[in-house]
Image (tube, grey):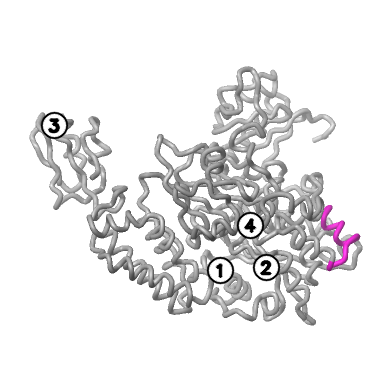
């Protein structure tokens, strides 16, 4: 395609979410229709990464107008091509309605979902074709690597990262610059390594996946910069095999970088050599822990090692190793290009820059968001997230996945930064943010996360292997209506014991969901124990379905839908439910047309 002839661009999301909704078929149909209307020389179709508003996929943006089409179907493509691209008439019925303002179309920066965001790590996601290195170069890609290799010493690079205030985006928030300095200072006469943790295992988290799918070259560039700074010539990206699109695009990007001389020998004629390889993980959550990850890269069972020694001194194959996660690396090229002062001017005093969150659960705008540190939870939930669906009340938000804690509605004005979250019993973690409403049972939520950590424990240390299972047994006992007040004391005591004695971060943080829900929702635990009632009606053993005799019309539909014959009665008279037979499946309530059945 002659770029001089291009008058418009059609950007179609090729991230996992939109791909699963059929965006690949949209791309093919768009190309077919453009040829049919003889527009294929004038309009360029670009498959991008995630735009962020995952709930509206498949997404398509047409430039230069900036028309944001949402939930596009294959049958809509012909109309978009014939009306918009051929005649210049935007198809308003297919637009994301928040962008429609009388006869005008709002820019994305004016839409509630985007206007409080600030994209640094996600800068190129949804903007460029991730499988085309020239598009990355066109947005200043590899400029930072060139600057580092031709203008800066290793010490200057590390000093710039330290001055930026960047902290690790994968868990505890350790200073990235200090980690680089420690690895640089470590003795490594036989070589050093740089590694990337792309083993994103938290339930509901998809931040790293989206960056890798939408902007893989920025991670390659950042790792090459890190390799130069610490004195490493080999890097490894440890990525989940369950991320096939990310794996494919990373490999394409690595091959392209080698072809362009941006990986390999004598990069930018600087004398610096650096190469990258992928290592696929088999889905073990524990391999997100740095020492377990390195053990897995070495081809062994992914189990954590005691620390010290820390990886900066003794990591991969017992050599000094620098490990950061995907989002941390994604900030590096922009820090180098724009300067440490620019980055440190964003965020709070101790938490600089932005943070990417995967916003999910009971929220209207499910998707990927990047906000300046210090943005409050209320702003994320109400302004960016669009509030809670169906008029329900916000109850809690879980940050940090199985390692984090639940933040109650009373703390919605808490600023999102490392220290504030720790103070209220949660943590930043990798960036999953799951929203819950009044229909969620907080005891059941704690049980859900414990079930996950019990399954994912590697079993190497007894506190985690045995302790988390005992916690789960106590939670199950409580949700089954068999708990006692003494069990609540046992829960708390066991939580602190596991935190203090587990070998790695998985076990040390596994009790956090229990401790935070005990702290903020103790009344729900006591209702399960004292009153044998689940206030949210979630725990089956503590809930029952009841027929309101005044509302029941005696239509018998509920009895016909009951799979165990627990409902009886006479037509045109109120029916009743035999609680001994009822399996609490809810089929009767779903079938009732008169809202005569409710959960008690």
Query: Whole-Å distance between the Cαs marked 1 and 3?
Result: 57 Å
Q: Give the residue at x 22% y 40%.
A: 588
Between discs 1 and 3, the one toward the N terminus: 1
Q: Nearer the viewer, mark 1 or mark 4?
A: 1
In three-dimensional space, the C-alpha distance between marks 2 and 1, rounded to whole angstroms, equals 13 Å
Q: Quadrant of the N terminus?
A: top right
Check contact, mark 2 vs mark 1: CB within 8 A.
no
The Cα atoms of the two marked residues, 3 and 2, are separated by 66 Å
Chain part drawn in magenta: 143-155
The disc placed on residue 275 is none
Based on the displayed image, in which of its 4 quarters is residue 597 positioned? top left
Nearer the N terminus, badge 2 or badge 1?
1
How far is mark 2 from mark 4, CA to CA?
19 Å
Rounded to the nearest angstrom, the CA distance separating label 4 from label 3 is 58 Å
**Could you say whether the residue bearing mark 2 is in a helix, strand or loop?**
strand
Secondary element under disc 1, as helix, strand or loop, is helix
The residue mark sitting in front, 3 or 2, is 2
Main SS class of the magenta portion in the image: helix
Q: Residue at x 53, y 70 (%)?
A: 505
Categorize mark 1 by other alpha carbons within 10 Å: few (<14), some (14-19), many (20+). many
Which residue is label 2 attached to?
Answer: 323
**Separation of disc 1 and disc 4 at Cα?**
17 Å
- Disc ID at residue 554: 3
| Secondary-structure class at tag 3 | loop
Q: Which mark is residue 247?
A: 4
Say few, some or many: other residues with alpha carbon within 10 Å of mark 4 (under 14 / 14 to 19 / 20 or more).
many
Question: Would you say residue 496 sits in the magenta stretch?
Answer: no
Residue 447 in picture, x, y percent from top left: 37, 60
Q: Quadrant where the C terminus lies?
A: top left
- Image location of residue 35, percent across then percent down: 70, 29
Badge number at residue 287: 1
């Amino acid at each position: 395609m002659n770029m001089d002839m291009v008058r418009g661009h059609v950007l179609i999301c090729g991230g996992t979410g939109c791909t699963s909704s059929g965006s690949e078929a949209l791309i093919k149909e768009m190309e077919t229709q453009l040829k049919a209307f003889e527009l294929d020389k004038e309009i360029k179709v670009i498959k991008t990464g995630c735009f962020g508003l995952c709930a509206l996929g498949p997404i398509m943006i047409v430039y230069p107008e900036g028309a944001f089409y949402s939930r596009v179907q294959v049958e809509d493509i012909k109309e978009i091509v014939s009306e918009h691209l051929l005649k210049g008439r935007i198809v308003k019925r297919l637009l994301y309605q928040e962008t429609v303002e009388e006869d005008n179309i709002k820019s994305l920066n004016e839409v509630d979902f985007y206007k409080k965001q600030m994209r640094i790590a996600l800068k190129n996601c949804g903007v460029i074709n991730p499988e085309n290195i020239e598009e990355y170069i066109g947005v200043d890609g590899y400029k930072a690597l060139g600057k580092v290799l031709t203008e800066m010493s290793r010490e200057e690079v590390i000093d710039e990262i330290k001055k930026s205030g960047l902290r690790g985006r994968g868990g505890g928030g350790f200073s990235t610059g200090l980690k680089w300095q420690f690895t640089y200072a470590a003795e490594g006469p036989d070589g050093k390594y740089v590694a990337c943790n792309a083993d994103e295992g938290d339930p509901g988290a998809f931040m790293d996946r989206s960056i890798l799918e939408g902007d893989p070259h920025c991670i390659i560039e950042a790792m090459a910069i890190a390799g130069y700074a610490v004195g490493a010539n080999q890097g490894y990206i440890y990525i989940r095999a369950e991320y096939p699109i990310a794996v494919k695009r990373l490999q394409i990007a690595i091959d392209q970088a080698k072809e362009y001389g941006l990986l390999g020998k004598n990069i930018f004629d600087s004398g610096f050599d650096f190469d990258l390889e992928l290592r696929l993980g088999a889905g073990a959550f524990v391999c997100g822990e740095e020492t377990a990850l390195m053990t897995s890269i070495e081809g062994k069972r992914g189990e954590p090692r005691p620390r010290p020694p820390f990886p900066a001194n003794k990591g991969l194959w017992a050599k000094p190793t620098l490990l950061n996660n995907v989002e941390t690396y994604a900030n590096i090229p922009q820090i180098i290009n724009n300067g440490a002062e620019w980055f440190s001017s964003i965020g709070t005093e101790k938490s600089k820059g932005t943070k990417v969150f995967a916003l999910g659960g009971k929220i209207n705008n499910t998707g990927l968001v990047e906000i300046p540190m210090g943005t409050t939870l209320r702003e994320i939930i109400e302004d960016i997230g669009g509030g809670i669906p169906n008029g329900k009340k916000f109850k809690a938000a879980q940050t940090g996945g199985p390692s984090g804690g639940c933040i109650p509605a009373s703390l919605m004005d808490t600023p999102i930064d490392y220290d504030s979250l720790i103070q209220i019993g949660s943590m930043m973690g990798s960036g999953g943010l799951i929203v819950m409403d009044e229909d969620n049972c907080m005891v059941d939520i704690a049980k859900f996360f414990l079930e996950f950590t019990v399954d994912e424990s590697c079993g190497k240390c007894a506190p985690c292997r045995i302790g988390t299972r005992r916690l789960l047994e106590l939670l199950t006992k409580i949700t089954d209506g068999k708990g006692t007040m003494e069990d609540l004391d046992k829960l708390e005591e066991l939580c602190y014991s596991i935190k203090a004695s587990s070998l790695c971060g998985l076990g040390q943080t596994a009790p956090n969901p229990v401790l935070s829900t005990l702290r903020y929702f103790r009344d729900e635990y006591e209702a399960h124990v004292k009153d044998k009632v689940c206030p949210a009606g979630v725990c089956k053993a503590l809930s029952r379905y009841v027929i309101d005799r005044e509302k029941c019309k005696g239509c018998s539909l509920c009895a016909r839908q009951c799979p165990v014959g627990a409902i009886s009665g006479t037509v045109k008279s109120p029916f009743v439910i035999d609680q001994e037979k009822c399996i609490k499946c809810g089929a009767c309530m779903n079938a009732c047309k008169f809202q005569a059945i409710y959960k008690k």
